[in-house]
Image (cartoon, rainbow, N blue to C red):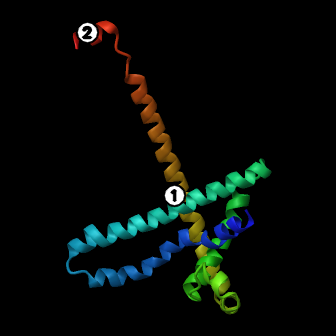
């Protein structure tokens, strides 16, 4: 169980990290043969990739929240999410600036620690982490609210459809 939790913590930043792949968007657009490739290929691909990443992140944070609340039922959502967002912000900064991957911690622990130290003691690290933290928290909030609204609307739609269906009587079935 402990190794599963460690895996979750080291791989969790990968979900919001996908947003940083937007740095490649400009080059992909420039390399496109014509506008149709950009409009119908590149932009939808990036949107799907980033959307999937943040939906995965939302699901992960919901699972962590559920796990924490099974032990501490009264804990507030922000008390769980804020540290997760901060950990992910640090992970994104480490991944983007020092080019660390989740598996580097296991395959090259000493080199990883040196690269982490170098990045985290860099003068701009607190600013970079703060910016990424705000971006992660804000995007997570928007995705959570949109997903909740969508699920609520689908639930109401399903209930309305179920309410309109009337069981057919034997005489109605006989006429059909």
Please say if 129 is above or below 64.
below
Q: In the picture provided, is 123 more to the left or to the right than 138?
A: right
Q: Residue 32, position in %: x, y?
A: 25, 80
Q: In the picture provided, is 151 more to the left or to the right than 141?
A: left
Q: Residues within 10 Å of mark 1 (few under 14, many from 20)?
A: some
Give the residue pinned by disc 2.
Answer: 174
Q: In the picture provided, is 12 more to the left or to the right than 173?
A: right
Q: Residues within 10 Å of mark 2 (few under 14, many from 20)?
A: few
Q: Tell me what residue is drawn at x 73 percent, y 62 percent.
A: 1
Considering the image in quadrants, where does the C terminus appear?
top left
- Disc with the residue nearer the chain's start (1 vs 2): 1
Q: Residue 48, position in %: x, y?
A: 40, 64
* Nearer-the-camera pick, 3 or 82: 3
Please say if 15 is above or below 62.
below
Q: Secondary structure at mark 1?
A: helix
Q: Residue 60, position in %: x, y?
A: 60, 60
Q: Please name which of the two marks, 1 or 2, marks the residue nearer to the observer.
A: 2
Give residue 175's mark.
none
Q: Secondary structure at mark 2?
A: helix
Q: Quadrant of residue 131?
A: bottom right
Q: CA distance from mark 1 to mark 2?
A: 49 Å
Q: Tell me what residue is drawn at x 21 percent, y 71 percent.
A: 36
Q: Residue 104, position in %: x, y?
A: 62, 84
Q: In the picture provided, is 82 more to the left or to the right than 13?
A: right
Give residue 143's mark.
1
* Nearer-the-camera pick, 2 or 56: 2
Q: How many marks?
A: 2
Please say if 4 is above or below 100.
above
């Amino acid at each position: 169980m402990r190794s599963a939790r460690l895996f979750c913590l080291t791989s969790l930043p990968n979900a919001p990290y996908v947003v940083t792949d937007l740095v490649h968007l400009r080059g992909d657009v420039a390399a496109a043969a014509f506008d149709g490739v950009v409009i119908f290929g590149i932009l939808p691909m990036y949107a799907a990739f980033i959307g999937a990443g943040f939906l995965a992140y939302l699901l992960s944070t919901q699972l962590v929240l559920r796990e924490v609340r099974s032990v501490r039922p009264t804990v507030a959502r922000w008390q769980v999410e804020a540290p997760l967002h901060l950990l992910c912000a640090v992970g994104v900064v480490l991944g983007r600036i020092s080019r660390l991957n989740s598996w580097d911690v296991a395959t090259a622990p000493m080199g990883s620690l040196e690269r982490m130290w170098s990045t985290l003691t860099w003068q701009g690290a607190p600013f970079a982490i703060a910016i990424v933290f705000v971006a992660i928290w804000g995007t997570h909030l928007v995705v959570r609210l949109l997903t909740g609204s969508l699920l609520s609307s689908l639930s109401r739609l399903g209930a309305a459809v179920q309410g309109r269906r009337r069981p057919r009587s034997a005489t109605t079935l006989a006429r059909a």
